[in-house]
Amino acid sequence: MELLLQFLSNTGFYLAEYRNFVMLGIGSLFVYLAIAKQYEPLLLLPIGFGVLIGNIPFFKGFGLGIYEQNSVLHYLYFGVTTGVYPSIVFLGLGAMTDFSSLLARPKLMLLGAAAQTGIWATLLSAMALGFMPNEAASIAIIGGADGPTSIFLTAKLAPHLIGPIAIAAYSYMALIPIIQPPIMRLLTTRQERLIRMPEPRPVSKKELMIFPVVGLFLCCFLAPASIPLLGPFFFGNIMKESGVVDRLANTARTAVIDTATIFLGLTVGASTQGDVFLNPKSVGIFLLGAVAFSIATASGVIFAKIMNLFMTEKINPLLGAAGVSAVPGSAREVHLVGLKEDPTNFLLMHAMACNSSGVIGSAVCAGILWSFMM
């Protein structure tokens, strides 16, 4: 009987507390949304299942938890805390990105820059609410709607906040179909949503090969701290466009990025142990994240409307919402909102131009914040 009682006292049933059940509910919700609703399943399914793994109660000191030295999960988490996984993800993103639509209409880069307003507005808001500068900078980058960038910067500035910031960033990326359309409709008229974009000009192979080199120099000379993200990103892109290392480019955009995404999502989810994750700061981060993402979306749309005041060839203001770096979710949502107004108005390629510039913009902002806060 004594052995039986000792066994029972070591089970998760005995060790569980309410915080575990709260997080298990959140993890189950993520898994449900990924499978049943197909909300960004490549992100939510690994994270949601990681939340379930990380919140199964266990007795401390046995080398099981993600925060315990020498545990398997702790070793896997090393790629998050050092920024290795985000850099690998950026390598794969670069190998997947087509900059032809951006090079065809360079002015659309401005919309990607305008959407980064959400980062700076949230930085000031977080500091006003009492967060330390390093914490505020990590929270602010959620406004870029870029999960890997948020994780990378937080790992450098506020590693104790990786869990809530990563969950907030990826949650809002997954909820793009819910968050962005109302903002787009609120800030635009039907006449503006019906604006048709002209066909982009053909972009030469030479331009596509030169752009990653020029982009690397311009961005990384401006913000050298962005090299760990934009270096692999532009390298992946030149592998794709050069055509001489197709095998490497294909590996980067398939096996490599998929592997990094699996371990990134799983370990970030597992880092949300109830006793570490559930605190007032986490609630504040989620609220500020929602504000940041909303401001970023609105800023892009409003800036497109301002540009139209000075242009004879008008831009569809919906494209401004794709200035956040949630690739390709926000571009797809812009396209769908445009199709609801006019089933023959195809905005996807133009939105991808804004989307890809948003990826670069958020990484540059992360580099600037890192250099200022260190």
Image (cartoon, helix red, strand yellow):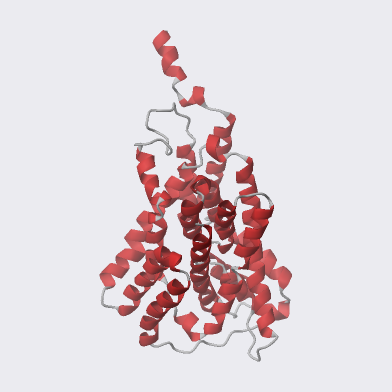
Judge whether 244 appears above or below 273 on screen. below
Q: Which is nearer the eye, 29 or 270?
A: 270
Given residues 149 and 9, the one toward you in this image is 149
Q: Residue furthest top?
A: 1
Q: Position of residue 145 (x, y in %)?
A: 55, 61
Residue 133 sits in quarter: bottom right
Side of 202 relative to 164 (left or right): left
Above or below, 173 relative to 268:
below
Q: Residue furthest bottom?
A: 312
Horizontal arrangement in the rendering, residue 46 relative to residue 172 (left or right): left
Q: Is residue 149 left or right of residue 175?
A: left
Q: Position of residue 99 (x, y in %)?
A: 44, 78
Q: Residue at x 64, y 41 (%)?
A: 280
- The residue drawn where x is 56% and y is 83% is 107
Q: Is residue 343 above or below residue 86?
A: below
Query: Which quarter of the rendered picture does the N terminus lie within?
Result: top left
- Residue under the point 56% across and 63% down: 144
The answer to whether any part of residue 31 appears in the image is: no
Q: Position of residue 370 (x, y in %)?
A: 50, 60
Residue 216 percent coordinates (x, y): 41, 74
Q: Can residue 364 be seen from the camera position used here?
A: yes
